[in-house]
Amino acid sequence: MMYMHYCKPCHRVHMLNGHKLNCPKCSGPITELRIPYMEYVSMDMSEREAFKSRCADEEQLQELSTTYRMYKYSKWYKKQQALATASETISE
Ligand SMILES: [Zn+2]
């Protein structure tokens, strides 16, 4: 399976085989994107450029990225998990 990743230092969207944490070019940390591979490949050049510009913006990148690896060990993630669990309990 191919997954989309964004590398900030390279300012590049990489198509990589599997869930990667490091850039194949600069070996720096990369962000895995939520966009499916097929959706990205169906974009034309201008759409890809626009998408890349969105990735370059820190806030938009957060929205575009997958969360399951990146925030797994962070305090933020744990807090979100705790909140989710709490609200599930209330709705039951
Ligand atoms: Zn890179």
Image (cartoon, grey):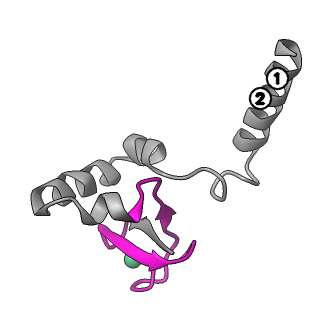
Image quadrant for the C terminus? top right
Q: Main secondary structure of the magenta part?
A: loop
Image vertical order of residue 89 relative to residue 32, above or below: above
Q: Which residue is under mark 1?
A: 88
| Local SS, label 2 | helix
Identity of the residue drawn at 86% across and 13% down: 90
Rendered location of residue 91, percent (x, y): 82, 14
Query: Mark 1: which secondary structure?
Result: helix
Residue at the image point whose x is 63% and y is 57% from the top: 70
Q: Callout 2: few (<14), some (14-19), or many (20+) C-alpha neighbours within 10 Å?
A: few
Rendering quarter of residue 42: bottom left
Measured along the vertical axis of the image, is residue 78 above or below residue 36? above
- Of circles 2 and 1, the one toward us is 1
Q: Quadrant of residue 44?
A: bottom left
- Tag 2 near tag 1, CB within 8 Å: yes
Q: Residue, x 73% and y 49% (percent of image)?
A: 74
Magenta region, residue range:
8-37
Compared across the picture, whether 29 is left or right of 61 comes to right
Q: Which residue is mark 2?
A: 84
Amino acid at dot 2: Ala
Taking the magenta stretch, the answer to whether it contains residue 46 is: no
Q: Residues within 10 Å of mark 1 (few under 14, many from 20)?
A: few
Left or right for 75, reference 66: right
* Residue at horizontal 82 percent and vertical 23 percent from the top: 88
Name which residue type carries label 1.
Glu
Q: Could you say where residue 14 lies in the image, as x and y percent from the top left?
A: 37, 73
Q: Residue furthest left?
A: 46
Q: Quadrant of ligand 1?
A: bottom left
| Real-space CA distance between mark 2 and mark 1, rounded to the nearest whole angstrom | 6 Å
Give yes or no for residue 30 being in the magenta stretch: yes
